[in-house]
């Protein structure tokens, strides 16, 4: 009888423990999952006046900053993060397939291996120029062509100048190829410098006569001279190897994620006004002598596009006369 009572007590005690454990499990069970967070786009910005302003009183008011803000407002299905980077790090992130995008990566063949670009450029800018201290000329003088251009390849072959460059920066296939060949054939003539402030560091080094010329864009040089002290006055010489205009594309990592993001960007409507505003703001920052040149080149690009559009979509009156048989 005693044994039976002991067994009964043990059974009741075990049941109590199980109930307590069950109660505890119920109390610690995870709460229902919250709705999935929107995917994140990390927008990588270059310290690149006047396109991105990363500090100072006008922080976030650069030309590309403002266009990016307009782009972000039209992409509410994503979370957006801004991150200051460098050309080299952007390449590394994209090659690693990270969820990153940028407005500052020039479209060149070597990058298309790991970068997805927008279907159309969002902006066209004047090409890079040769930058030298005002009053400087190589020993043999500037050998200008009829349009005032100098040939970078001829200049380097002469052995009369040293060019300071940023090794990861690109200026278009023709100029990039000239630099690549010169690095291989005459490494003492093409001096590569680390990316500290992009062109800003190069210009300060050029002012100290460490080399003779560099490459860049007149608009960024003039904006840097306004915002920073200690920079010489510079002269700008057009390059024979440069294209008339340089197209700028939105770019993302070449991954399924990047494809989805770019499809969202390519489908956006209402960006024409933002592109027009960007063009006008850019023109206002150009040196005065460059503005007519920019307008003429933009008009030259727009003319064949307008003609093609007219041929594809003729005016209503013309279309009607072509589609209807002539009355007899």
Image (cartoon, rainbow, N blue to C red):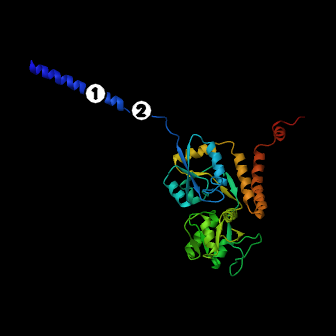
**Residue at the spot x=34%, y=28% of the render?**
26
Which element type, helix, strand or loop, lies under badge 2? Answer: loop
Disc 2 from disc 1: Cα separation: 20 Å
Local packing at callout 2 (Cα closer than 10 Å; few below 14, some 14-19, many 20+) is few
Looking at the picture, does residue 18 appear above or below residue 57?
above
Which element type, helix, strand or loop, lies under badge 1? Answer: helix
**Residue at the spot x=62%, y=66% of the render?**
200
- In primary-sequence order, the first of circles 2 and 1 is 1
> At which x and y percent is residue 121?
66, 52
Q: Quadrant of residue 32?
A: top left
* In this view, the mark in front (2 or 1): 1
222 or 308, nearer to the observer: 222
In the rendered view of the protein, which quadrant contains the N terminus? top left
Residue sitting at the far bottom: 139
> At which x and y percent is residue 47?
60, 59
Residue sitting at the far top: 1
223 or 328, nearer to the observer: 223
Residue receiving disc 1: 20
Residue sitting at the far front: 57
**Residue at the spot x=54%, y=67% of the render?**
194
> At which x and y percent is residue 289?
78, 64
Residue receiving disc 2: 31
How many marks on residues?
Answer: 2
Q: Is residue 168 visible?
A: yes
In the rendered view of the protein, which quadrant contains the C terminus? top right
Q: Quadrant of residue 223?
A: bottom right
Q: Quadrant of residue 246?
A: bottom right
Q: Is residue 176 visible?
A: no
**Residue at the spot x=79%, y=43% of the render?**
314
Q: Is residue 27 left or right of residue 307?
A: left
Looking at the picture, does residue 94 appear above or below residue 269?
below
241 or 218, nearer to the observer: 218
């Amino acid at each position: 009888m005693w044994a039976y009572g002991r067994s009964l007590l043990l059974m009741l005690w075990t049941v109590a423990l199980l109930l307590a454990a069950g109660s505890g499990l119920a109390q610690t069970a995870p709460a229902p999952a919250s709705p999935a967070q929107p995917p994140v786009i990390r927008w990588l910005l270059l310290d690149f006046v006047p396109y991105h302003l990363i500090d100072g009183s006008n922080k976030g008011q650069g030309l590309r900053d403002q266009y990016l803000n307009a782009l972000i407002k039209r992409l509410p299905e994503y979370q957006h993060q801004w991150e200051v980077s460098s050309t080299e790090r952007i390449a590394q992130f994209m090659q690693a397939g990270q969820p990153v995008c940028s407005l500052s990566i020039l479209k060149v063949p070597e990058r298309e291996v790991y970068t997805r670009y927008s279907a159309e450029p969002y902006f066209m800018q004047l090409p890079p120029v040769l930058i030298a201290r005002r009053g400087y000329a190589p020993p043999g003088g500037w050998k200008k062509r009829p349009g005032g251009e100098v040939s970078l390849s001829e200049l380097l072959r002469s052995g009369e100048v040293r060019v300071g460059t940023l090794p990861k920066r690109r200026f278009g296939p023709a100029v990039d190829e000239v630099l690549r060949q010169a690095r291989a054939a005459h490494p003492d003539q093409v001096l590569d410098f680390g990316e500290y402030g992009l062109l800003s560091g190069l210009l300060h080094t050029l002012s100290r006569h460490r080399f003779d010329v560099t490459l860049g864009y007149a608009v960024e040089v003039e904006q840097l001279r306004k915002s920073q002290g200690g920079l010489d006055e510079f002269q700008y010489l057009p390059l024979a190897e440069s294209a008339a205009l340089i197209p700028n594309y939105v770019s993302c990592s070449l991954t399924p994620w990047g494809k989805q993001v770019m499809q969202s960007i390519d489908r956006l409507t209402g960006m024409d006004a933002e592109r027009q505003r960007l063009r006008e703001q850019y023109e206002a920052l150009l040196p005065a002598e460059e503005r007519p040149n920019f307008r003429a080149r933009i008009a030259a690009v727009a003319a064949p596009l307008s003609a093609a559009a007219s041929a594809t979509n003729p005016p209503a009156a013309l279309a009607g006369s072509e589609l209807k048989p002539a009355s007899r």
